[in-house]
Image: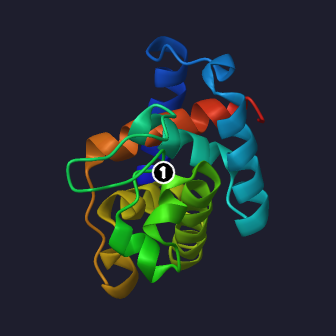
Amino acid sequence: MLEVILIAVGVWATFNYFNTNVADIPQEVLTAMRTSSSSFGVPVALLLAIGKHESGFKQNVTGKAGEIGIMQILPSTGADLGFSVADLKELQGNTNCAAMFLSKLLTKYKGKIADVIAAYNAGKVVLSSGGLYFNLNYVLMVYSYYTFYSMRRI
């Protein structure tokens, strides 16, 4: 049911709310995300949606809790997946780490994109715990971007 609601909200937001344009994606970001998508079997639209929401496609940003780069990955999450801080500071390393994490989440949540988005926001704890806690606003926004990018077949 949550998926149906999110699809409806995503379609509405795509056409009525967002000032989003595929041309706004920096070419190096699109190339890195396509490479990560291909390497880890994650939809490029999902990587783009998260990158758009987390950092506005900016690699040289650090979050309040120490998250790094375009996909705002915590160093501890990166380390658990075999990525160093130096890797996370590089665009391709950052998107590869996110894609690896998303691949694990897609398997765990049987491809349910809304659950995967919620789990990405919750962080690595969701891989070891049974519960899924999420920020509804985050899920709605990222799902809306996901719908937008999916419809454009990037």
Front-most of residues 23 and 120: 23
Residue 60 falls left or right of residue 101: left
x 40%, y 59%: residue: 73
x and y, in percent, of residue 97 in the image = 55, 65
x and y, in percent, of residue 130 in the image = 31, 84
When the figure is inspected, residue 59 is found, relative to residue 27, above or below; the finding is below
Q: In this view of the protein, can residue 74 be seen by the observer?
A: yes
x 79%, y 59%: residue: 38
x and y, in percent, of residue 23 in the image = 68, 18
Label 1: which residue? 3
Query: Which scheme is used to colour this image of the protein?
Result: rainbow
When the figure is inspected, residue 152 is found, relative to residue 6, above or below; the finding is above
Mark 1 surroundings within 10 Å by alpha-carbon count, few (fewer than 14), some (14 through 19), many (20 or more)? few
Residue 38 falls left or right of residue 87: right
x and y, in percent, of residue 100 in the image = 59, 70
The image quadrant where one finds the C terminus is top right
Q: Which quarter of the figure has residue 74? A: bottom left
The residue furthest front is 86
Amino acid residing under circle 1? Glu
When the figure is inspected, residue 147 is found, relative to residue 106, above or below; the finding is above
x 78%, y 35%: residue: 153
The residue furthest left is 64
x 54%, y 63%: residue: 87
Q: Which quarter of the figure has residue 152? A: top right
Front-most of residues 31 and 101: 31
